Every structure is written in C-alpha cells, then in structure tokens.
Image (spheres, grey):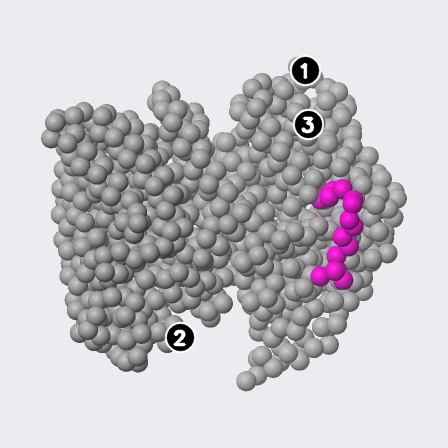
Amino acid sequence: MDDVLIIKDGVMPFLSILIFLPLAGALGLFLIGNDHFAKIWSLLVTLATAICSLPLYFGFDLTTAKYQFAEHHAWIPAWDINYTLGIDGISLLLVLMTTLIMPLCVLGSWSYIRKRVREFMACLLIMETSMIGVFVALDFVLFYILWEAMLIPMYLMIAIWGGPRKVYASTKFFLYTLAGSVLLLVAIIALYLQNGSFFIPEMMGQEYSFLFEILVFLAFFLAFAIKVPMFPFHTWLPAAHVEAPTAGSVILASILLKMGTYGFLRFCLPITPEATITFVPYILWLSVAGILYGGFTALAQRDMKKLIAYSSVGHMGFVTLGIFALNKFGVEGAILQMINHGVTTGALFLCVGMIYERTHSRELADAAGVGKFMPWYVTFLAFFSLSSLAFPGTNSFVGEFMILVGAFTKYKIIAACAIPGAVLAAAYMLRMLQKVVWGGTDNPDHTGLLDLNLRECITLAPLLIFVFWIGLSPEPFIEVMHVSVTHLLTQVNGAMVDAPLDLARLMLP
Amino acid sequence: MESMLFIPEIWVLLGSLILFLVSIMDGSGRAARFWAGLIAVGAILLTAATFFSEGELFFAAYKVDLFSQLFKLLVVTGFGVVVLLGQDLRGVDEKIKPEYYLFLLLSTLGLMMVVSCVELLSLFVALELSSFALYLLVPMRDERTGTRIQMESAAKYVIFGVMATGIMLFGMSYLFGLTGTTYLAELLPKLHGIGMQPAAVVGITMVLAGFFFKLGLFPFHFWLPDVYQGASNETTAFIASVPKLAAVALIIRGAALYLPDGQAAGSLIAVLAVVSMFYGNLLALVQKDLKRMLGFSGIAHAGYLMLGVLVFKESGYATSVYYVIGYLVMNLAAFLVICNVARQGENLLVEDLSGLSRRAPLMAVILAVAMFALAGIPPFVGFMGKFMLLAGALQAGHLALVVMAALNTAISIYYYLSVVRVSYCSDSDDVETIQVDGLVKLVGVLLVAVIIFMGVAPNTILELAAEAVRNIL
C-alpha cells in the first residue's frame, strides 16, 4: 500500500478538510434562521473550501504517479474497508474545478432561489462533500457510498426547486443513475473477492481471467456511460438539465458528468485493460454517434437550456473519444476537455439562468435581441459561446485539438467522422448567439431589462478568466497530468498484446 | 442468583398484571399508555443491566446469553418506541385501549422469551404467546377507520398463523422422532451424527417454515399485506418490526441445525429469497395504500435477510442480524411518521402525503430518510446492510442470486422514491400543519441518527452481532 500512497505525517489532511468542511457547513445551516445569512454562510463555506484546495495544486509533486496528500484510516475492519484518500494528476484538476464551481453556484442561486433557501444551500454543500469525495476516494466502498449518496441531494434539488416538469425529470434522473450503478456494486464485490481488498490501486494491474474482466468492464461501463452520458444512455440528461434550477444544471454539467469519464479513467482503463481494448472500437463509434447526435439535436432546439444540454452530449462524446483513443494526446486532451466543459458549460448555464430570472422564459425566441439592452451580458455570453464551439484562443480549442490529434494517430476514419461535430458546434452556438444578441425584426420588448449587476459579473468573471487562461497557456494545467497519464497508459498498453488473443480464446471453445 | 437472569421477563410479566388491573378497573387509555411506557423503560434498563450475563434456567430449556439479550433489548426497545409513537392510539376504541396495551405487552413478553428458548416445546409455547396476542391486536381496530377490513385481516392472520404453526409442530415431531430429544443443544450433534437424512432436512425445513411465516417470506407471506392494511397503524408498526427480530433469531437458530457444509437447504432458501424479492418489489410498485406498500416491501426485505442465512456461516448470520436491526430502525422511523400524520388513525394513501414537507417538515425528513434507507441508498444503514449481505453471498458463490438482489434494488427504488416525491413535490390544498408531540419528534430524530450512524460506522454493532452469533453456534 505504501508504494502507491504518499502519506506525509504532520501535514494538514487537506483532502479530509475538503470533504468535511462543506458537510460541517451544511450542519451549521441548521443553526441559522435567516435566509440571507444562510446564503452568506454558504458562500463563505464554499470559498473556504476553495481556498483549502489551493495547496493541493501548489504542493503537487509533478514527478510521481503515486497518490499524493494521501490519508489512510481503518474504517470497517471486519470487511477490510478503509477510509483511504489520495489524488493524482487525473483527479487533481477535477477537485480544483469542483471547488471553483461551487461558490459560483451559490452566487448564481442568490436571487434565483426564493423558497426554502436554507435547505437548498444545505443540498449544495452536501453535494460538494460527496463530489469531492468521489474524486479523492481510493477505497471502492467509500467511492460507491459517495457516488450513490449524491443522488439524494441532487434529486431533491431538481424535485423541489425545479421547473414545471420537475417530477418527471427528477424521477428519471434518479432511476436511471441508480439502475446503472447497482451492478457496479456487484462488480466491486467481485473485485474484492479476487483481491481481498477494496483498495483501488491494488485492483489495478492484476491478472484476472478474460471473462471476468469483460463482465466487470460491462458493469463499470453501464454505470459510467449513464453518468457521462454516452449516446444512447443520454435521455435523462436533457430532462434533468432543463428542469433543474440554475445551480443544479451547473453542477450536473460541470461536475456530475465528469464523474462518468473520471470513472472510465480511474477504473475501466487500469483495472480491466484487456476488456477496454476489446471494446475500444465500439465505444469510439458510440462517442462519434454522441458527437453527431448531440450536435444535430442541439441545432433544432428552441429552449436554450435544452440546446446547451444536447451540446453537452456532443462535448462529452469528444471526451470519451479522447479517453478511448488510449494515447497520451487523447487522454490528456480528454482530461483537459473535462475541465473545459465544466468551465464553459457551467458558465453558459449560469448565463441562461440570468436571462431566465429576467424574462422567466428559457425560450430562445423570448430572449431574442437582448444585446441592445444588456451589453455586458451578451459580452460574456459571446465569449462563452465561442469557447463552447472551440474557437482558437479559448480553452475548448486546446482540448478538442489534442483529442483529435490523439484520435487521428490511430483511428483516422473515426476521427474524421467526428470532425462534423465541431462544425455543428459552431452552427448551433452561433445560431443561439446571433438570436440572443440581435434577434430579428420581431424581437419582444426588452426595454425594462436590467444588465448584469456586480454579483452576476463576479459570478461569471472567474470562469471567463479560465477560458482564456487555459486557451492561451494550457501548460500549467497539462503538466500536472503528464506523469499520471503516462503511468495509466503503461498499465493499459501492457495488455494491448494479449487482448485479441484472449478474445479469440473466449469466442472459440 | 440464577433467577436474576430472568428479571427482565418477570418485570414485563408483572407489568402486564398492572395493565390487566388497569383494564379491569376501567382505566383510561392515557393511564394505560403511561404504564406501558414506564414498563418499557424499566424493561430496557433491566435488559441492559443483564446484557452481558450468561446462564441457563428451567432445566436448561432457557438460555441467557449475548445473543438472547441483544435481541431482548431490541424487542423491548421496539416495544417502547411503538408505545411512544402512537400518540393517542387513534385507530383503537377508547374503551379497549388498556387491553390493547396489555396484549401488546404480552406479545412483547412472548418475543422476549422466544429468543432465549433452546428447547423446542418451550420455544413453541413462547412463540404462541407472542402470536396469539398479535392475533387479538389486529381486530381491535375500531370500525370507523378500519371499515371492517380488520376482521378479514385478523381471520387471515389467524388461519395462516395456525397453519404455519401446524407445519412447524409437524417438523418438530420429525426432529424428536429422529433424535429422541427436544433440546437444540442435543439435537445438533445427533442430527449431524445420523448424517443429515432427508427426513432431518425436511424436519428442519418445516420448523423453519413456522419462522418464515413470522418473517413473511414467500410462500408464507399471504397474510402480510392484508394484515398491514387491516390493522391499525400502531399495530402494523409493531407487527412490521418487532416480531421480525425474533423471527430472524429463530431462523438463525434453526438454520444452524443444517450441516454447515452440506447446505442441504441452501438452494431452497435461495429460491425462496429470490421469489420473495421479486414478488415483494414488483407488487409494491402498484400499491396505493402506504401500509400495504410497506407490507410488500417487507416481503422483499425478508428475501434480502435470507441472503445472510443461506451462507450458513457466522459472518452471514451476523450480517443478517445487523440488517434486521437496521430494518427495525428504518421501519419504526417510517411508521412513526405514518402514525402521526394519520390524524384519525385512518389508512394513508401515498397521495395523502402530498405537501407533507410543508405541513410537517421534520416528519417529511424522517420519512425521506426512512425510505432512502429502505431502498438501500448510502449513507444509510439499508445500504451498508445490503452491501454486506451481497458481499457475503457472493463470497459463498451465489453470483446469480446477488445479481438478482442488486437488480431488485433498482426495482424497489421507484416506489420508495414515489413516497418522497409526493411528500416533497406535490402541493396539497390541505395546508394545515400537523402537530407532533415533542417527545415523538425527539425519538424520530434519534431513529434518523441511528440510521445514519449504523450506515457510516457499522463496526461496533457488526462486531456485537458477530459476537452474539458466535455464542449460539
């Protein structure tokens, strides 16, 4: 265990602080009677969490693929279940992004949430606990508990504070994601019985029988593909996105979807490499299907939130394309694109939330032509839209470029098929932007609309900074993942030779 | 000093005499409830005081050990909570309230004794004491709220109960015929000595059938939804939780009689478990009556509990004990809400819960936690228990069974979630807030705390359960 964990004695347990600080904040909310104080309190708690996450970046050792800032405590000795935490280059950026997004979610809900504010903030904080926990957990049971536990606050967020079809959307979200992950639990137990431990790194690089790997991979794949969501498991996403309150949509898009792709990287690739290689062609084609399907459907939407939701399906298709290209460019691009999508799509959902607060409609037609009255708003929107369509100079360009480079080196036809997705992204984003900024000759009357206030500008500004920071200087973000990704790929590529043979053996009696 | 071991039972017995006096002197329901609460507190303290004592009584027919005391403590605690949560026993006529508490207490006494009995006849007597008291509690619901359905339920309960008892007695006669003894301690080596003849397997299985009836395992489940629906809310709260504890204790004692490696009945129990899960969960999906829904969910949970038993090992039994403790707490939490939301003691439909989060926010939270826990969502005890059951069963090689149990989780979430959905999402015209007693609120919060505590820190109770199970193997 010590050969994969770096446990430093006498150092602050930053990861535990990140997990428990929001939880303590949520409990603290029960003592606060006033809604306004509850908002300020939540903002302070999420900001404190964000500040506590900074040492992770600055103290991160770039030279090792081991799990850093690790913590290890016995939890349930009878089953050898431990409280083990640690981060590597794959999870570091995701944790940082989570802590960045959460204060913005609080700010974005400041005036959007009017009823049961305290409960809403408690849901947000509990979500933060379980999301950070998922990214840092190195014990499979701990991971699963946090992975499932987050369904409850997310469900409540959609079901209580959601839009008109909230009941349908929240139930579908819950059922879909839960049904996907029940077999994950069986796979976890099966892996435990093979290894005698729930420690995740110990499960990697073991010799499992090929059939066992295939079954475990399929159980993993179902759970993670639903979360991503990959085509054709995406149907819960537009419903949940559209009905969720702004903060809920932001969390869903920016962080929750990343858990699926994180699951691929953390579990599927290193634990079941041979099965991964066997399934690569199918998954790549599913990714391409997602990219094209998401693009075409987004093009047809009238509802802004739905448009962005379907664009997410397309963007996440690029991420899975990069991951399963199984080379350095592809995987690093995919991780970067996960961050980019979190930043950009989160910002776009915040933008839609801001217009919804003013016009009480998410229809593109109702928001047509606000550019004249809300210059600041459309400025932000323009930059985020350009980022979403991967305009050079913005963050998504770097990510998509790396993914396509990675894909082209091995799978030329598949990569070529994904290219129209990038064109489609430009088409639907520019269509939305054009409508919102200028509209047509029959724009609704917007004379009463107020432009963004200071709070809203502060909400969007950090994300805008990251759009250009990653877009113009991606190296600080990419360099943290080099070693971990290289390590991951050696774990997978070792199996590259055996996989076709094993598949043949499985097929032929 | 030996008789000191029997103190909790004597206390409860004396308590039932007090309640008997209250009833013949036409005491009020309030007075009876007061006495019942007092007796419960005393019984909890006395059982806790004798928690770690050990000994044998009555010609070794009655054994006090950690296993029995653990279950006794749970039984009396469950009784105490049931007395407390039925604020004014709304579904029962004022005139017979003292009698109601009397029979409730007698049933508790039977359940306390049954977990200590290690001899077949005394076990039978204790089991019948608890059962007959329960048979009487069901029709005690008044006409208004029960709309006579309680009579039908009671009749079903008695008929199925007597039938199950008959099967159990028949099985006991086999065991006696094969071994010439009724003491479990002597039965075990003798049965294993004769090499597990088919007659022995059939005998043990028939004895188990009597216990399966208590638990509501398929195919002995027919009474369960009807009784849940027909009995008053408080009675259902009791039937749904406390006797199941004793049932699990008895099933573990009975299953220990099988050869540990032969697993003669393993596949039978596995089939019963799977059918119970699917039957319970699928039928619960379409229920409108909340209690009836919980009844079907109880059948499914009986199936889950069997996952631990069919491992036929200490670790499996221990997880079953752990799960049933969790089940007790989850059920009591759910029924605490049901009893207090039904203002006239009427049966609640799921849709009657609409707007609960406005009318009684705390009750809505407790109900939501109970439902998520029953569904097996972490971080609640339902998940931890189910996880350990699945892990144990998979370890014993029951892959297909485990996969089906996992799929059942996905099926069941729909109806549990619908309860939460209605109480949080639907707005009702009825905006009157529901007044809940402060003590009841406190107990509800405590139950939620236990649900969460057992879910995130299962170790203490798991070790206790393992230690208790080790005592009887």
- Label disc, if present, on residue A43 of the rendered structure: 3
Find residue A426 and report its horizontal and vertical position in percent: 74, 43
**Residue position for label 2:** B261
Mark in front: 2 vs 3 = 2
Residue that label 1 marks: A447
**Side (left or right) of A349 relative to A141:** right
Camera-nearest residue between B307 and A321: B307
Q: Position of residue B349 (x, y in %)?
A: 30, 36
Q: Is residue A470 positioned above or below A324 on the image?
A: above
Instruction: Count neighbours of disc 3 (C-alpha within 10 A) and say few if under 14, some if 14 to 19, many if 20 or more.
Output: many
Comparing A147 with A454, the one in front is A147
* Residue at point 51%, 43% (across, down): B453
Q: Is residue B257 covered in magenta?
A: no
Q: Are marks 3 and 1 in contact (CB under 8 Å)?
A: no
The amino acid type found where label 1 is placed reads Thr
Same-subunit check for callouts 2 and 1 = no
Tell me if residue A163 comes above or below residue A228 in the rendering.
above
Check disc 2 and give the amino acid type: Asp
Q: Residue B164 or A307: which is nearer the viewer?
A: B164
Callout 3: helix, strand or loop? helix
Chain bearing tag 3 is A
Other-residue count near label 2 (Cα within 10 Å), few / some / many at <14 / 14–19 / ≥20: few
Please state which of the two labelled residues, at mark 3 or mark 1, is closer to the viewer.
Answer: 3
| Whole-number angstrom distance, CA of label 3 to CA of label 1 | 32 Å
Q: Main secondary structure of the magenta part?
A: loop
Report how far apart the C-alphas of labels 2 and 1 lie in the structure.
82 Å
* Mark 1, other Cα within 10 Å: few <14 / some 14–19 / many ≥20: few
